[in-house]
Image (tube, rainbow, N blue to C red):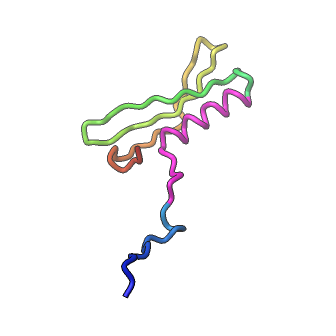
Amino acid sequence: MTDTIPDLWPTAALKTTVLTPIAILRTQATCLSQKTQGLLVGDVTVTAAENGQNQVSLFVVVPALNNYRHRLMTVQYRREATCP
């Protein structure tokens, strides 16, 4: 009988590169700003809701129009569901 206990965790099933919704939207905001050379600027806001959820919104800002803002999307998710 062997004294070594084998690793029972599958390698493929455990992902360590999961991105949070905040990270995804911030990346998209940066891409928008770069692709339009600053004519449009992406902005992400994060607010904590009372029900234990985070709310993340992606805005398009137009600096040439007095920083006009238009919300493209809002994502809401449980805070404890995110990875540190």
Residue 30 x, y percent position in the rendering: 63, 31
- Look at 39% across and 83% down and name the residue there: 2
Q: Is residue 26 above or below residue 80?
A: above
1 or 45: nearer the eye?
1
The magenta-colored residue range is 15-35
- Look at 60% across and 32% down and name the residue there: 29
Residue 45 x, y percent position in the rendering: 46, 29
The quarter of the picture where residue 48 lies is top left
Q: Is residue 9 above or below residue 16?
A: below
Q: Is residue 25 magenta?
A: yes
27 or 61: nearer the eye?
27
Residue lying at the far bottom in this picture: please name it: 1
Q: Judge from the rendering whether residue 36 lies leftward or rightward of residue 7; answer left or right.
A: right
Q: Is residue 6 magenta?
A: no
The quarter of the picture where residue 76 lies is top left
- Look at 51% across and 59% down and name the residue there: 15
Q: Judge from the rendering whether residue 46 lies leftward or rightward of residue 44; answer left or right.
A: left
Residue 42 x, y percent position in the rendering: 59, 28
The overriding secondary structure of the stretch rendered in magenta is helix
- The quadrant of the image that shows the N terminus is bottom left
